Amino acid sequence: MLDHVSITVSDIRAAEPFYDAVMAALAVTKMSSGETWISYGERCDADHPDLTYLLIRPGPVPEAAYGRHWCFKAQLREQVDAFWRAGLSAGGSDDGTPGLRPEYHPHYYGAFLRDPDGNRIEAVCHRRFA
């Protein structure tokens, strides 16, 4: 459904190791970085319309917003676990340990983190036995 997403952080250099770690755990390629951006995934084009792109940009500390978060797909449950561990090791905080969440569906396996600015992110694997 999503083509691309932009997330703002107050300190892009502090956010970079965190997003490098969690995206690597999900096997998402870092595309580039500069003074005012970090990008992951791949941009869509006419030949590749199903790609997804994440852009991290500097901005003010995000306001707290209950329920707002970004969820990234994982192919394996082990990637969800790795995402969570990598995020904690790179300056994030726990906002929901890895595990099944049957209230969504019987095989929903997810984990939640807060990035160093408090943005809430999630990784999920929907596969039955991944």
Image (cartoon, rainbow, N blue to C red):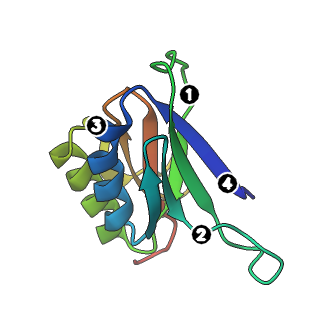
- Circles 1 and 3 in contact, beta carbons < 8 Å: no
| Separation of marks 2 and 1 at Cα, in angstroms | 27 Å
**Quadrant where the image shows the N terminus:** bottom right
Left or right: 103 in relation to 30: right
Image coords of residue 62 (percent x, y)? 50, 21
- Lower sequence index among marks 1 and 4: 4
Residue shown at the point (27%, 60%) measured from the top left: 81
Query: Which residue occupies the foreground of this view, 19 or 85?
Result: 19
Give me the disc on residue 93.
Answer: none
The residue at which mark 3 appears reads as: 14
Closer mark to the observer between disc 4 and disc 3:
3
Give me the disc on residue 4.
Answer: 4
The residue at which mark 2 appears reads as: 42
| Separation of marks 4 and 3 at Cα, in angstroms | 22 Å
Amino acid on which the number 1 mark rests in the picture: Gly
Amino acid on which the number 3 mark rests in the picture: Ala
| Separation of marks 2 and 3 at Cα, in angstroms | 23 Å
- In what element is the residue under mark 3? helix
The residue at which mark 1 appears reads as: 67
Closer mark to the observer between disc 1 and disc 3:
3
